[in-house]
Amino acid sequence: MASTPPRHARYCTEITEQTRMFRETLAGADLSARVPSCPDWTLRELALHLGRAHRWVHETVRTRARDMVPEDTVPGSAGPAGAGTDTGGAADAGGGAYAEALDRWLAEGAELLVAALRDAGPDTDVWTWADDRSTGFWARRMTHETVVHRTDACLATGRPYEVAPDVAADCVDEWLDIVASPQAQEYDEGLRQLRERAGESLHLHATDQPGGTASGGDLDTGLDTGPAEWLIELGADGPRWRRTHARATTALRGPLTDVLLVFYRRLPLEDSRVELSGDRGLWEFWSARTSFGG
């Protein structure tokens, strides 16, 4: 079995823990309830989406795939019995037997994914949709996929949501890495439109982090720390970003978890927990072109 460096190990641990909390959020919930942050989905559909993502990446890593794995070839991706074709009825109602089967299916998928990632380590070559063609990419991506969809489940059930500061900060870092990558800009017209606002900038500032850092992890124990502030500079060749305090065209301030949720369009700008200053239009322009899909 490949060795597991601390950062990779932390991602694997977070996938397990975030999935556990996601499952706890679903426990006893009405699976037919709409998810306000993903209005086309019910809670059941949200759970199936996340579980399928885990199993798809597991299959990609397990087989050391060099090309995209077709989703319909992934073992177990249909979900619990009946979930693959039933778009309503007993499954959405969240009956006891179905809910228990869904819970087991989610737990098993996360367990399979984490086992494959631990076995492969972070540096094994596999297919990804990004510039980084490594298993480490998938460990980070699936951590944040699970973090954000746990938000969706909490919003749908009215349950409180919190995430470790260093994990929240890494969620922001990763999405900015993706948005700023040449490959993403080549693929996505919306990202190319950001060049229309070249010379302008956005600032994110977490107000609840002691000493201004996203504490809770470091290179020895898992995730990097750094200033819990981000400067995003828009340019003619795309956005650039760094962790720093600086004046900007528009600035978003608030507790780190809430800044993360606004950044991912899970909370509205009007939410009383955050404060936006400067050019609101620039923030809306940015947000509309960098939205994180389901």
Image (tube, rainbow, N blue to C red):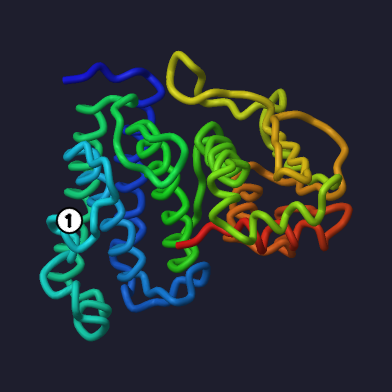
- Judged from the image, the secondary structure of the residue bearing numbered disc 1 is loop
**Marker count (numbered):** 1
Q: Of residues 94 and 241, which is closer to you in this image?
A: 241
Q: Of residues 263 and 216, which is closer to you in this image?
A: 263
Q: Position of residue 293 (x, y in %)?
A: 49, 61
Amino acid type, label 1: Val
- Compared with 266, 88 (above or below) is below
Q: Relative to residue 72, is residue 24 drawn left or right?
A: right
Q: Position of residue 176 (x, y in %)?
A: 61, 42
Q: Of residues 20 and 277, which is closer to you in this image?
A: 277
Residue at mark 1: 74
- Compared with 247, 202 (above or below) is below
Q: Relative to residue 117, is residue 163 drawn left or right?
A: right
Q: Quadrant of residue 117?
A: top left
The N terminus sits in image quarter: top left
Query: Which residue occupies the extreme bottom position in the image?
Result: 89
| Residue under the point 12% across and 70% down | 97
| Residue under the point 73% across and 54% down | 194
The C terminus sits in image quarter: bottom left
Q: Residues within 10 Å of mark 1 (few under 14, many from 20)?
A: some
Q: Position of residue 287 (x, y in %)?
A: 68, 59
Q: Quadrant of residue 105?
A: bottom left
Q: Relative to residue 122, is residue 261 drawn left or right?
A: right
| Residue under the point 44% across and 34% down | 132
Q: Position of residue 200 (x, y in %)?
A: 85, 47
Q: Relative to residue 58, is residue 221 drawn left or right?
A: right
| Residue under the point 54% across and 57% down | 292
Query: Which residue occupies the extreme top position in the image?
Result: 220
